[in-house]
Amino acid sequence: MQSSPWKVRCATLCFTLLSITGVKLRPLGEQEKMIQLEAVKKSILDRLGLHKPPVIREKMNKDEMRKMYWLYQEKLMELRGNTSKDETPERRVHILTPKLERSTKKCGKHGSNSHRYNLIFYRTQTIHQQLSVMRAELKLCKDVLAALKSAAANSTSKPMVNIYKVTESSHANGGQEYRLLDSKPIDKDMMTLNVDTAVQHWLASSEKCLQLELVVILDKTFVNDGNKQIGADNALVLEVETQEQAHSKTRRTRSLSADEDCKKSEKKCCRKSLLVSFEQIGWSDWIVHPSTYEMHFCDGSCPHNYKPASMHAQIKYRMHHINGDTPAPCCVPGSYDPMVLMHYNSERKLVFTVFDDMTVRKCHCA
Protein backbone atom coordinates (compact mmCIF):
# COMPACT_ATOMS: atom_id res chain seq x y z
CA MET A 1 0.00 0.00 0.00
CA GLN A 2 2.85 2.33 0.79
CA SER A 3 4.28 4.41 -2.02
CA SER A 4 7.92 5.41 -2.46
CA PRO A 5 10.13 7.25 -4.98
CA TRP A 6 11.46 3.83 -5.99
CA LYS A 7 7.97 2.71 -7.03
CA VAL A 8 7.45 5.84 -9.09
CA ARG A 9 10.85 5.36 -10.81
CA CYS A 10 10.02 1.72 -11.39
CA ALA A 11 6.68 2.63 -13.01
CA THR A 12 8.44 5.13 -15.28
CA LEU A 13 11.13 2.57 -16.24
CA CYS A 14 8.51 -0.08 -17.02
CA PHE A 15 6.63 2.43 -19.15
CA THR A 16 9.83 3.18 -21.15
CA LEU A 17 10.71 -0.50 -21.65
CA LEU A 18 7.21 -1.40 -22.78
CA SER A 19 7.28 1.47 -25.27
CA ILE A 20 10.57 0.22 -26.75
CA THR A 21 9.38 -3.39 -27.08
CA GLY A 22 6.13 -2.33 -28.78
CA VAL A 23 3.81 -3.77 -26.12
CA LYS A 24 0.35 -2.17 -26.22
CA LEU A 25 0.13 0.39 -23.42
CA ARG A 26 -2.72 1.91 -21.47
CA PRO A 27 -3.30 5.61 -22.19
CA LEU A 28 -0.87 7.96 -20.50
CA GLY A 29 -3.78 9.29 -18.45
CA GLU A 30 -4.04 5.95 -16.64
CA GLN A 31 -0.34 6.06 -15.77
CA GLU A 32 -0.76 9.55 -14.40
CA LYS A 33 -3.74 8.42 -12.33
CA MET A 34 -1.71 5.57 -10.82
CA ILE A 35 1.05 7.96 -9.79
CA GLN A 36 -1.48 10.46 -8.41
CA LEU A 37 -3.24 7.68 -6.49
CA GLU A 38 0.01 6.57 -4.90
CA ALA A 39 0.69 10.18 -3.90
CA VAL A 40 -2.77 10.46 -2.29
CA LYS A 41 -2.30 7.21 -0.33
CA LYS A 42 1.14 8.23 0.89
CA SER A 43 -0.06 11.70 1.90
CA ILE A 44 -3.02 10.33 3.90
CA LEU A 45 -0.81 7.86 5.74
CA ASP A 46 1.75 10.57 6.52
CA ARG A 47 -0.94 12.93 7.85
CA LEU A 48 -2.29 10.16 10.09
CA GLY A 49 1.21 9.32 11.31
CA LEU A 50 1.08 5.80 9.86
CA HIS A 51 3.78 3.94 7.97
CA LYS A 52 1.24 1.49 6.61
CA PRO A 53 -2.50 0.85 6.96
CA PRO A 54 -3.47 -0.68 10.33
CA VAL A 55 -4.64 -4.29 10.35
CA ILE A 56 -8.15 -4.47 11.86
CA ARG A 57 -9.17 -7.86 13.20
CA GLU A 58 -12.15 -6.86 15.34
CA LYS A 59 -14.59 -4.06 14.52
CA MET A 60 -17.21 -2.24 16.58
CA ASN A 61 -20.68 -3.72 16.97
CA LYS A 62 -23.62 -2.16 15.13
CA ASP A 63 -24.85 -0.01 18.04
CA GLU A 64 -21.43 1.50 18.68
CA MET A 65 -20.89 2.04 14.98
CA ARG A 66 -24.26 3.81 14.68
CA LYS A 67 -23.35 6.13 17.57
CA MET A 68 -20.00 6.95 15.98
CA TYR A 69 -21.69 7.65 12.66
CA TRP A 70 -24.05 10.17 14.35
CA LEU A 71 -21.05 11.88 15.93
CA TYR A 72 -19.38 11.91 12.52
CA GLN A 73 -22.37 13.66 10.95
CA GLU A 74 -22.46 16.24 13.77
CA LYS A 75 -18.77 16.98 13.30
CA LEU A 76 -19.21 17.34 9.56
CA MET A 77 -22.14 19.76 9.97
CA GLU A 78 -20.17 21.77 12.52
CA LEU A 79 -17.22 22.15 10.14
CA ARG A 80 -19.43 23.09 7.21
CA GLY A 81 -21.13 25.67 9.39
CA ASN A 82 -17.80 27.17 10.42
CA THR A 83 -16.50 27.38 6.86
CA SER A 84 -19.71 28.97 5.58
CA LYS A 85 -20.10 31.68 8.25
CA ASP A 86 -18.69 34.32 5.95
CA GLU A 87 -21.10 33.19 3.22
CA THR A 88 -24.21 33.34 5.40
CA PRO A 89 -26.57 35.81 3.75
CA GLU A 90 -27.89 38.70 5.80
CA ARG A 91 -31.45 38.52 6.99
CA ARG A 92 -33.92 40.48 4.93
CA VAL A 93 -37.18 42.12 5.96
CA HIS A 94 -40.09 42.10 3.50
CA ILE A 95 -43.08 44.44 3.94
CA LEU A 96 -46.31 43.17 2.37
CA THR A 97 -49.61 45.03 2.27
CA PRO A 98 -52.83 43.04 1.83
CA LYS A 99 -55.80 43.29 -0.40
CA LEU A 100 -58.31 44.19 2.30
CA GLU A 101 -62.04 43.43 2.26
CA ARG A 102 -64.74 43.70 4.92
CA SER A 103 -66.43 40.33 5.36
CA THR A 104 -70.19 40.11 5.78
CA LYS A 105 -70.13 36.56 7.12
CA LYS A 106 -71.51 35.92 10.58
CA CYS A 107 -70.10 32.64 11.74
CA GLY A 108 -68.59 31.04 14.81
CA LYS A 109 -69.22 31.82 18.44
CA HIS A 110 -68.34 35.51 17.92
CA GLY A 111 -70.35 35.90 14.70
CA SER A 112 -72.95 38.31 16.04
CA ASN A 113 -70.54 40.70 17.74
CA SER A 114 -67.48 40.78 15.53
CA HIS A 115 -66.03 42.73 12.64
CA ARG A 116 -64.31 40.44 10.12
CA TYR A 117 -61.76 41.40 7.47
CA ASN A 118 -60.33 39.27 4.68
CA LEU A 119 -56.60 39.84 4.13
CA ILE A 120 -55.00 38.52 0.95
CA PHE A 121 -51.21 38.74 0.51
CA TYR A 122 -49.48 38.06 -2.80
CA ARG A 123 -45.95 36.91 -3.47
CA THR A 124 -43.35 39.39 -4.68
CA GLN A 125 -40.18 38.72 -6.66
CA THR A 126 -38.23 38.50 -3.41
CA ILE A 127 -40.60 36.01 -1.76
CA HIS A 128 -39.76 32.49 -2.90
CA GLN A 129 -39.54 28.88 -1.67
CA GLN A 130 -35.81 28.93 -0.84
CA LEU A 131 -36.35 31.20 2.15
CA SER A 132 -36.59 30.32 5.81
CA VAL A 133 -38.96 32.49 7.85
CA MET A 134 -37.24 33.88 10.93
CA ARG A 135 -40.15 36.12 11.97
CA ALA A 136 -43.59 36.97 10.56
CA GLU A 137 -45.77 39.60 12.23
CA LEU A 138 -49.00 41.25 11.20
CA LYS A 139 -48.80 44.84 12.42
CA LEU A 140 -51.91 46.91 13.20
CA CYS A 141 -50.95 50.55 13.05
CA LYS A 142 -51.99 53.40 15.33
CA ASP A 143 -54.86 54.71 13.18
CA VAL A 144 -56.68 51.41 12.87
CA LEU A 145 -56.29 50.67 16.58
CA ALA A 146 -57.69 54.10 17.42
CA ALA A 147 -60.70 53.39 15.20
CA LEU A 148 -61.30 50.04 16.85
CA LYS A 149 -60.97 51.52 20.33
CA SER A 150 -63.47 54.22 19.39
CA ALA A 151 -65.91 51.56 18.21
CA ALA A 152 -65.69 49.90 21.59
CA ALA A 153 -65.59 53.06 23.73
CA ASN A 154 -68.56 52.05 25.88
CA SER A 155 -67.73 48.36 25.93
CA THR A 156 -67.57 46.60 29.29
CA SER A 157 -64.39 44.75 28.28
CA LYS A 158 -61.40 45.33 26.03
CA PRO A 159 -61.97 44.42 22.39
CA MET A 160 -60.08 41.34 21.20
CA VAL A 161 -58.33 40.85 17.88
CA ASN A 162 -57.98 37.34 16.48
CA ILE A 163 -56.09 36.36 13.34
CA TYR A 164 -56.94 33.16 11.45
CA LYS A 165 -55.35 31.23 8.60
CA VAL A 166 -57.97 30.51 5.94
CA THR A 167 -57.69 27.37 3.79
CA GLU A 168 -59.99 25.62 1.41
CA SER A 169 -61.59 22.63 3.11
CA SER A 170 -60.37 19.18 2.11
CA HIS A 171 -63.82 17.70 2.77
CA ALA A 172 -66.20 16.83 -0.02
CA ASN A 173 -68.72 19.49 0.98
CA GLY A 174 -66.10 22.20 0.33
CA GLY A 175 -66.16 25.49 2.22
CA GLN A 176 -63.28 27.02 4.16
CA GLU A 177 -61.41 26.09 7.31
CA TYR A 178 -60.12 28.56 9.89
CA ARG A 179 -57.12 28.03 12.17
CA LEU A 180 -56.42 30.51 14.97
CA LEU A 181 -52.88 31.89 14.78
CA ASP A 182 -52.88 34.56 17.50
CA SER A 183 -55.24 36.51 19.76
CA LYS A 184 -54.65 39.72 21.73
CA PRO A 185 -56.63 42.49 23.46
CA ILE A 186 -56.42 46.01 22.05
CA ASP A 187 -54.63 47.95 24.75
CA LYS A 188 -51.71 49.66 23.00
CA ASP A 189 -51.03 52.10 20.17
CA MET A 190 -49.21 49.39 18.19
CA MET A 191 -50.11 45.71 17.99
CA THR A 192 -48.30 42.77 16.40
CA LEU A 193 -49.87 39.38 15.78
CA ASN A 194 -47.70 36.30 15.31
CA VAL A 195 -48.33 34.58 11.97
CA ASP A 196 -45.05 32.62 11.70
CA THR A 197 -46.52 29.20 10.96
CA ALA A 198 -48.92 30.45 8.29
CA VAL A 199 -46.19 32.34 6.45
CA GLN A 200 -43.72 29.44 6.76
CA HIS A 201 -46.20 27.04 5.14
CA TRP A 202 -47.05 29.61 2.48
CA LEU A 203 -43.44 30.22 1.44
CA ALA A 204 -42.71 26.49 1.38
CA SER A 205 -45.72 25.85 -0.87
CA SER A 206 -46.42 26.85 -4.45
CA GLU A 207 -49.50 28.90 -3.49
CA LYS A 208 -49.53 32.37 -5.05
CA CYS A 209 -51.36 34.07 -2.20
CA LEU A 210 -51.83 33.84 1.56
CA GLN A 211 -55.33 34.37 2.93
CA LEU A 212 -55.89 35.44 6.53
CA GLU A 213 -58.95 36.67 8.37
CA LEU A 214 -58.80 39.36 11.01
CA VAL A 215 -61.64 39.23 13.52
CA VAL A 216 -62.29 42.12 15.93
CA ILE A 217 -64.51 40.97 18.81
CA LEU A 218 -66.54 43.74 20.48
CA ASP A 219 -68.91 43.80 23.41
CA LYS A 220 -72.39 42.48 22.46
CA THR A 221 -74.14 45.56 23.86
CA PHE A 222 -72.19 47.89 21.60
CA VAL A 223 -71.88 46.05 18.31
CA ASN A 224 -74.52 48.08 16.49
CA ASP A 225 -72.48 51.29 16.89
CA GLY A 226 -69.29 49.70 15.73
CA ASN A 227 -69.34 51.15 12.25
CA LYS A 228 -65.71 52.18 12.06
CA GLN A 229 -63.82 50.20 9.45
CA ILE A 230 -60.24 49.56 8.44
CA GLY A 231 -59.68 51.49 5.26
CA ALA A 232 -56.15 52.88 4.92
CA ASP A 233 -53.73 50.99 2.72
CA ASN A 234 -51.05 51.10 5.39
CA ALA A 235 -53.36 50.29 8.28
CA LEU A 236 -52.14 46.69 8.20
CA VAL A 237 -48.74 45.42 7.09
CA LEU A 238 -47.19 41.97 7.14
CA GLU A 239 -43.55 42.15 8.15
CA VAL A 240 -41.58 39.01 7.25
CA GLU A 241 -37.94 38.50 8.14
CA THR A 242 -36.27 35.79 6.06
CA GLN A 243 -32.96 34.09 5.48
CA GLU A 244 -31.90 31.85 2.64
CA GLN A 245 -32.16 28.18 3.53
CA ALA A 246 -28.95 26.31 4.37
CA HIS A 247 -29.40 23.65 1.71
CA SER A 248 -29.99 26.35 -0.89
CA LYS A 249 -26.77 28.03 0.16
CA THR A 250 -24.98 24.65 -0.07
CA ARG A 251 -26.33 24.11 -3.57
CA ARG A 252 -25.14 27.58 -4.55
CA THR A 253 -21.68 26.90 -3.10
CA ARG A 254 -21.48 23.58 -4.90
CA SER A 255 -22.57 25.25 -8.12
CA LEU A 256 -19.86 27.88 -7.73
CA SER A 257 -17.34 25.11 -7.05
CA ALA A 258 -18.50 23.22 -10.15
CA ASP A 259 -17.82 26.34 -12.21
CA GLU A 260 -14.17 25.87 -11.29
CA ASP A 261 -14.00 22.46 -12.98
CA CYS A 262 -12.03 22.17 -16.20
CA LYS A 263 -14.14 22.19 -19.33
CA LYS A 264 -13.33 20.12 -22.38
CA SER A 265 -9.97 21.16 -23.90
CA GLU A 266 -9.55 23.78 -21.17
CA LYS A 267 -5.88 24.75 -20.84
CA LYS A 268 -6.16 27.74 -18.51
CA CYS A 269 -6.05 27.44 -14.71
CA CYS A 270 -8.94 25.24 -13.58
CA ARG A 271 -9.84 22.40 -11.23
CA LYS A 272 -9.25 18.77 -12.23
CA SER A 273 -10.50 15.72 -10.38
CA LEU A 274 -9.50 12.21 -9.45
CA LEU A 275 -12.01 9.96 -7.68
CA VAL A 276 -10.37 7.78 -5.03
CA SER A 277 -12.39 4.75 -3.90
CA PHE A 278 -11.11 3.46 -0.56
CA GLU A 279 -12.66 0.09 -1.35
CA GLN A 280 -10.86 -0.24 -4.67
CA ILE A 281 -7.48 0.56 -3.13
CA GLY A 282 -8.10 -1.98 -0.34
CA TRP A 283 -8.61 0.49 2.51
CA SER A 284 -12.30 -0.08 3.28
CA ASP A 285 -11.41 -2.31 6.26
CA TRP A 286 -9.90 0.59 8.22
CA ILE A 287 -11.43 3.72 6.62
CA VAL A 288 -15.11 3.60 7.58
CA HIS A 289 -16.35 6.88 6.10
CA PRO A 290 -16.42 8.36 3.52
CA SER A 291 -16.20 5.47 1.07
CA THR A 292 -14.78 7.69 -1.66
CA TYR A 293 -12.74 10.87 -1.82
CA GLU A 294 -12.80 13.22 -4.80
CA MET A 295 -9.37 14.71 -5.00
CA HIS A 296 -9.37 18.06 -6.78
CA PHE A 297 -6.17 19.70 -7.94
CA CYS A 298 -5.40 22.88 -9.82
CA ASP A 299 -3.71 22.84 -13.20
CA GLY A 300 -3.36 25.02 -16.27
CA SER A 301 -1.73 28.19 -17.53
CA CYS A 302 -2.02 31.62 -15.99
CA PRO A 303 -2.18 34.26 -18.73
CA HIS A 304 -2.33 37.96 -17.92
CA ASN A 305 -5.16 38.98 -15.60
CA TYR A 306 -6.69 35.49 -15.50
CA LYS A 307 -7.99 34.53 -12.03
CA PRO A 308 -5.36 36.61 -10.22
CA ALA A 309 -5.18 35.81 -6.52
CA SER A 310 -3.99 39.33 -5.70
CA MET A 311 -2.42 42.47 -7.07
CA HIS A 312 0.91 40.77 -6.35
CA ALA A 313 0.02 38.02 -8.84
CA GLN A 314 -0.70 40.62 -11.55
CA ILE A 315 2.59 42.41 -10.89
CA LYS A 316 4.37 39.04 -10.90
CA TYR A 317 3.02 38.27 -14.37
CA ARG A 318 4.10 41.67 -15.72
CA MET A 319 7.59 41.24 -14.27
CA HIS A 320 7.81 37.75 -15.80
CA HIS A 321 6.75 39.14 -19.17
CA ILE A 322 9.40 41.88 -18.98
CA ASN A 323 12.11 39.80 -17.35
CA GLY A 324 12.05 36.01 -17.64
CA ASP A 325 14.03 35.70 -14.41
CA THR A 326 10.85 36.32 -12.42
CA PRO A 327 8.72 33.14 -12.26
CA ALA A 328 5.25 33.32 -13.78
CA PRO A 329 2.16 32.93 -11.57
CA CYS A 330 1.13 29.32 -10.97
CA CYS A 331 -2.32 27.72 -10.81
CA VAL A 332 -2.82 26.88 -7.13
CA PRO A 333 -5.71 26.22 -4.72
CA GLY A 334 -7.52 29.34 -3.57
CA SER A 335 -9.78 27.77 -0.93
CA TYR A 336 -10.68 24.39 0.53
CA ASP A 337 -13.63 22.45 1.89
CA PRO A 338 -13.07 20.38 5.05
CA MET A 339 -13.15 16.59 4.98
CA VAL A 340 -13.61 14.34 8.00
CA LEU A 341 -12.16 10.84 7.91
CA MET A 342 -13.67 8.23 10.25
CA HIS A 343 -11.03 5.53 10.56
CA TYR A 344 -9.20 3.14 12.83
CA ASN A 345 -5.90 4.45 14.16
CA SER A 346 -2.65 2.63 14.94
CA GLU A 347 -4.16 1.48 18.26
CA ARG A 348 -7.15 0.05 16.36
CA LYS A 349 -9.57 2.58 17.86
CA LEU A 350 -12.21 4.28 15.73
CA VAL A 351 -11.47 8.03 15.56
CA PHE A 352 -12.17 11.16 13.51
CA THR A 353 -9.45 13.09 11.71
CA VAL A 354 -10.21 16.48 10.14
CA PHE A 355 -8.47 17.49 6.92
CA ASP A 356 -8.95 21.25 6.46
CA ASP A 357 -6.89 21.51 3.29
CA MET A 358 -7.52 18.28 1.39
CA THR A 359 -10.50 19.13 -0.84
CA VAL A 360 -9.91 22.03 -3.23
CA ARG A 361 -12.90 24.27 -3.76
CA LYS A 362 -11.40 27.00 -5.90
CA CYS A 363 -8.29 27.59 -8.03
CA HIS A 364 -6.53 30.85 -8.83
CA CYS A 365 -3.22 32.17 -10.15
CA ALA A 366 -0.60 33.21 -7.59
Image (tube, grey):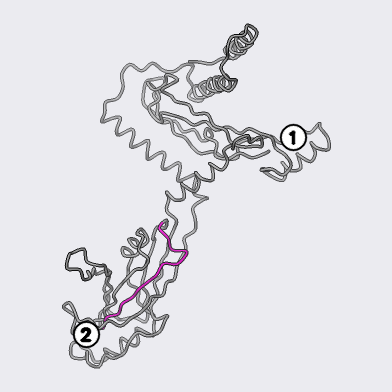
| Amino acid tagged 2 | Ser
Judge whether 201 appears above or below 27 on screen: below
**Range of magenta residues:** 115-129
Q: Is residue 294 magenta?
A: no
Category of crowding for the residue at label 2, using alpha-carbon neighbours closer than 10 angstroms: few (below 14), some (14–19), many (at least 20):
few
Residue furthest to the top: 21
Q: Which mark is residue 328?
A: 1
Which residue does the image show at 42% across and 80% down from the upper left?
A: 234
Q: Is residue 145 rendered to the left or right of residue 341?
A: left
Q: Which mark is residue 157?
A: 2
- Is 348 or 23 nearer to us in this picture? 23
Which residue does the image show at 36% across and 24% down from the upper left?
A: 349
Category of crowding for the residue at label 1, using alpha-carbon neighbours closer than 10 angstroms: few (below 14), some (14–19), many (at least 20):
many
Q: Position of residue 358 (x, y in %)?
A: 52, 32
Quadrant of res 333: top right
Judge whether 78 appears above or below 99 on screen: above
Which residue does the image show at 18% across and 91% down from the upper left?
A: 221
| Amino acid tagged 1 | Ala
Q: Is residue 122 magenta?
A: yes
- Is 65 or 31 nearer to us in this picture? 31
- Is 336 or 25 nearer to us in this picture? 25
| Inter-mark Cα distance, 1 to 2 | 82 Å
Q: Position of residue 332 (x, y in %)?
A: 63, 35
